[in-house]
Amino acid sequence: MFPRVYALDRDKRCTVAQRVNIIDWNNVLRRNPRGGAESSQFDDMKALISNVELSDNKDGWKWALNSTGFSIASARKYVDEHILQGGLSSTRWNKSVPIKVNVFRWRL
């Protein structure tokens, strides 16, 4: 996303968490950005990570459409009600179509 800044970083294996709260970038970069794309990407990166708030909570998946968790029925209901508006036919599985075609059609 920021290849010029990545090229300047001393530690190519660093994480975002290690870079979020840095005040003095002189110890992190091999040299200061020299204008042009380097400065532009550096400024964009700093603006982007300035709003990041990290927590120690464990990452996980959450299905926000239904409190009981993910189901094909809840996903189809959402697609039917919010994406297929204007009288389009609802999403239904067609048993006479090969599974690869059915899955591809459903994902479209």
Image (spheres, helix red, strand yellow):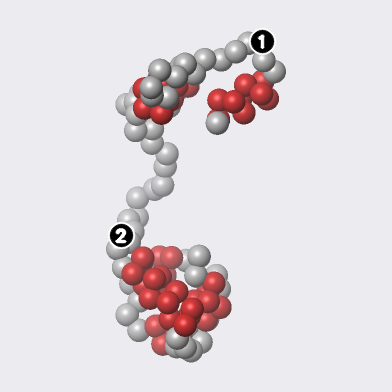
Residue that mark 1 sits on: 96
Residue 67: percent from the left, percent from the top?
A: 32, 26
Q: Earlier in the sequence, mark 2 or mark 1?
A: 2
Asked whether 19 or 1 is in front, the reply is 1
Q: Quadrant of residue 88?
A: top left
Look at 49% across and 70% down and name the residue there.
Answer: 2
Asked whether 88 or 1 is in front, the reply is 88
Gap between marks 2 and 1 measured at Cα = 49 Å
Q: Is residue 11 above or below residue 105?
A: below
Q: Viewer-nearest of labels 2 and 1?
A: 1
Q: Which mark is residue 12?
A: none
Look at 30% across and 60% down and name the residue there.
Answer: 53
Q: Which mark is residue 53?
A: 2
Q: From where the camera sits, is residue 9 visible?
A: no
| Disc 2 and disc 1 in contact, CB within 8 angstroms | no
Q: Quadrant of residue 43?
A: bottom left
The residue type indicated by label 2 comes to: Glu
Q: Is residue 7 above or below residue 13?
A: below
Quarter of the image containing the C terminus? top right
The residue type indicated by label 1 comes to: Ser
Look at 38% across and 22% down and name the residue there.
Answer: 86
Q: From where the camera sits, is residue 98 visible?
A: yes
